[in-house]
Image: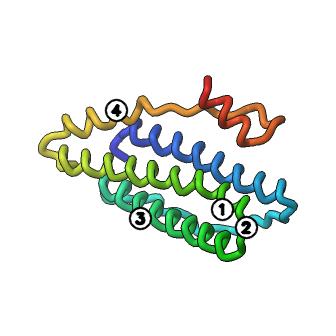
Amino acid sequence: RIGLKGFANWFMVQYHEEMLHAMKIYEYISRQGGKVKLLSIQEPPSEFDSPLDMFEKTLTHERFITKSINDLVDLAMAERDHATQIFLQWYVTEQIEEEENDNDIIAKLKLVGTGTENNNGLFLLDKELSTRMTTVLTDFSKGIEAGMKAAAAA
């Protein structure tokens, strides 16, 4: 509620990125002949004490996702499902990046502080986060993976 549009931008870009990650899993299961069943998920919190609180909760969630992916890798190994194990390695690497990004922003927030006494650092961090961009895929004709590679190359 304090007009941090750069923070809002960062999370909107993150949302689009996570949707692509989910669709990549959906497509993989379908291509492997599996049946995808989408279940409801718990609604994320919408109120936070501060930008720092928001990113600390984001990091906690990313750690949960990392554990879930690691559990899937363990299951794929136990089942000797080499294709799925290889597929999941991309997510293992991606989670390293996700947690690193959150940790970097948390460190910056702790450095600049979020009190009312001096918001210059928070203003500059908000400006930095406003520059994050993503490419929204519009061509899914060759699949999610091909679309992601084409977008990354552009």
- What residue did someone put label 2 on? 81
User: In the visual, does 106 lie left or right of 39?
Assistant: left
How far from the left and from the top, in percent, is residue 59? Answer: 40, 59
CA distance separating discs 2 and 4: 42 Å
- Mark seen at residue 128: 4
Q: Nearer the viewer, residue 59 or 114?
A: 59
Crowdedness of circle 2 by 10 Å Cα count: few (<14), some, many (20+)?
few
Dots 2 and 3: beta carbons under 8 Å?
no
Q: Is residue 44 left or right of residue 39?
A: left
Q: Residues within 10 Å of mark 4 (few under 14, many from 20)?
A: few
Residue placed under numbered mark 1 in the picture: 85
**Disc 1 to disc 3, C-alpha distance:** 24 Å
Local packing at callout 1 (Cα closer than 10 Å; few below 14, some 14-19, many 20+) is some
* Category of crowding for the residue at label 3, using alpha-carbon neighbours closer than 10 angstroms: few (below 14), some (14–19), many (at least 20): few
Mark 2, secondary structure of its residue: loop
Question: In the image, residue 109 lies at what x, y percent?
Answer: 25, 48
- How is the protein colored in the picture? rainbow
Hey, what amino acid is under mark 4?
Answer: Glu
Camera-side mark, 2 or 3: 2
Callout count: 4
Q: Residue at x 45, y 40 (%)?
A: 10
Residue 50: x and y in percent read: 30, 54
Residue at x-position 79% and y-position 66%? 37
Q: Amino acid at mark 1?
A: Gln
Is label 4 in a helix, a strand or a loop? helix
